């Protein structure tokens, strides 16, 4: 990415099921859902949304090998998307294990995301 126009941040949590992908997608959605960028097209090459580049950085606490980066990319509606994964976030007790919710243990996963948008 040659020019970063803005960065949005978010947090996502999977309380039951220990699904790091679900928490990561929620973090990305949290970062982008409450924003409107009415002038973004004018800032992009050829004033085209498909020329937008988006770099998503996610910090995950556990199960990096289970992270589905394609699901993260699909959370971004426009442009070409890349995903970087780093250690971070948090795994902490939810206080209860619910087998009917898919829990293997009582951990809940919190993932942080930074969504960089530019060209």
Image (cartoon, rainbow, N blue to C red):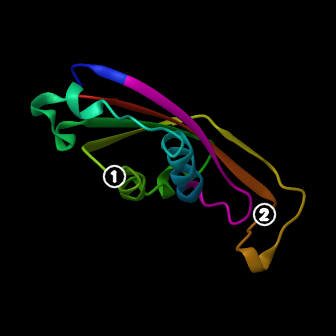
Quarter of the image for the N terminus: give it.
Answer: top left
Dot 2 lies on which element? Answer: loop
Q: Which residue lies under the disc numbered 1?
A: 77
Q: Main secondary structure of the magenta part?
A: strand
9 displayed left or right of 84 = right
Q: Nearer the viewer, residue 106 or 11?
A: 11
Residue 15 lies within the magenta run: yes
Q: Nearer the viewer, residue 78 or 94?
A: 78
In the image, is residue 22 above or below residue 5?
below
Mark closer to the chain start, 1 or 2: 1
- Residue shown at 40% from the left, 24% from the top: 6
Label drawn at residue 23: none
Front position among marks 1 and 2: 1
Give coordinates of residue 79: x percent, y percent: 24, 44
Q: Which residue lies under the disc numbered 2?
A: 105
- Residue shown at 74% from the left, 54% from the top: 108
113 displayed left or right of 46 = right
75 displayed left or right of 95 = left
**Where does the magenta region start and end?**
6-20
Dot 1 lies on which element? Answer: loop
């Amino acid at each position: 990415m040659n020019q970063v126009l803005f960065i949005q941040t978010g947090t996502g949590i999977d309380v039951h099921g220990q699904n790091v992908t679900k928490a990561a997608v929620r973090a990305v959605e949290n970062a982008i859902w409450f924003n409107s960028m009415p002038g973004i097209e004018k800032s992009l090459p050829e004033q085209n949304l498909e020329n937008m580049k988006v770099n998503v950085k996610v910090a995950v606490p556990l199960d990096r090998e289970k992270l589905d980066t394609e699901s993260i990319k699909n959370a971004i509606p426009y442009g070409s998307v890349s995903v970087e994964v780093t250690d971070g976030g948090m795994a902490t007790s939810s206080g209860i294990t619910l087998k009917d919710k898919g829990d293997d243990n009582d951990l809940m996963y919190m993932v942080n995301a930074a969504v960089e948008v530019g060209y």
